Amino acid sequence: MDSPQALTLLQYNRLISDALRCSALNGVWVIAELSDVSVRNHCYLELIEKDSASGITVAKIRGIIWATVFAQLSHRFEMETGQKFTSGIKVMVKVNLNFHEQYGISVVISDINPSFTIGDMARKRIEILNRLEKEGIINDNKNLVMPLAPQRIAVISSADAAGYGDFINQLRNNSAGIVFYTVLYPAMMQGLETPSSIIHSLNNIAQNLHLFDCVLITRGGGSSSDLNWFDDYNLAANVAQFPIPIITAIGHERDNTVLDYISNLRVKTPTAAAEWFIEQAESVLKAVTDMGARISEAAKTLISESKEALTKIGFQIPSIAMELISSNSIRLHHIAAHIPVVSQSKISQQSVWLKNMALQISSAANQSVKMESLKLSHISDTIQAYSPQNTLRRGYSITRTLDGKIIQSAQSIPKGTTIVTTLLNGNITSETI
């Protein structure tokens, strides 16, 4: 069997290149996310598309922007969007399909639509804010009451950021000599790890809430493109629900992120944040100083007025005393004059009362004597009725031994005992047998 006629791989790829060069895949606008952007004279990158639900990459193609085109496109893109042409942002680009015999299929980017990227960033920001509002947490941190003069500050920043150093230096060297207490919680402030890094620092601060009045999230310098990392739902939800006020100083005056909308206070830069803290403290210090001065002045006035009042009273005391002595002397004379009359009336009343009491006592005594006499008479009659003489009159007799002991039982005395029996009219002496 004869071998079939075959093409070399190079020949085959050239046929593909010729076929694609005539296709309708050139000059097409494509929406994709930039990935692996690298500028080495020319700009090399990947265009990717992720599933909105899972975040999994569902499409990918290599791309290139030639150096002369890239210089123009990147400059226009950065001027209009305020951020660099870099990985992680969504773009609308005009592409031409390119097939290289050695490197395969790629696209050559010839134009870009900055308005799409601006709209996409705004859309993403609005979606996050709408979600926070729907969940009812968008204003939680904003509604917290900021202390009048916060001095204990937890700072989330990159440790080597120039902005952080400026912030600390300005706080420490304030003209009023006010002391501020700061603790740095380092975090990444640019790149994909920014949201998770800041959330980690917030969690650490939450373990020591009693040590702080507020939290400052500050970025300092850097490009506007770095602000995109702060438009993250998870980070925004953590900031919105944080239990103490959060201040953001992560951009320039014209830049706003989701965190700027939901934080308790937004200032432009780390330096502006330091100025705000100092102004608040100086304002309270001035108010306290002014209050102290007013209290001192009021105290001096009160003391002066009191001295004048005491002097006036001192002059009035003799005349007041004489007036009181005179009025009380008249009152005493009046009372003294009434004492005999009142005394005589009281004595008369008591005399009448004593006479009545004497009559009542005499009557009560007589009545008591009569009653006791009746009782005695009754007792006497009873005694008489039960006396031995009356008993003898009724025919009874009393038998005694010679020593006068009454005999009640015949068995109680021995035989031959002399006994005496008493009758009404005499005694009989006998002997027991």
Image: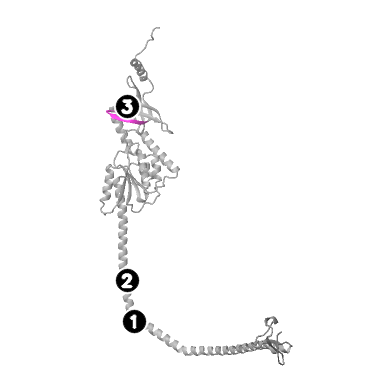
Q: Nearer the viewer, residue 375 or 366?
A: 375
Q: Which residue is mark 1?
A: 318
Q: Is 350 placed left or right of 85 in the picture?
A: right
For the residues labelled 3 and 1, the Cα–Cα distance comes to: 110 Å
Screen quadrant of the N terminus: top left
Q: Which residue is mark 2?
A: 305
Where is residue 426 shown, x and y percent of the image?
71, 92
For the residues labelled 3 and 2, the Cα–Cα distance comes to: 89 Å
Q: Is 153 placed left or right of 404 in the picture?
A: left
The image quadrant of residue 221 is top left
Q: Residues within 10 Å of mark 2 (few under 14, many from 20)?
A: few
The image quadrant of residue 362 is bottom right
Give the magenta range.
33-44
Q: Which residue is mark 3?
A: 64
Q: Amino acid at mark 2?
A: Glu
> Residue 68: which numbered mark, if any?
none
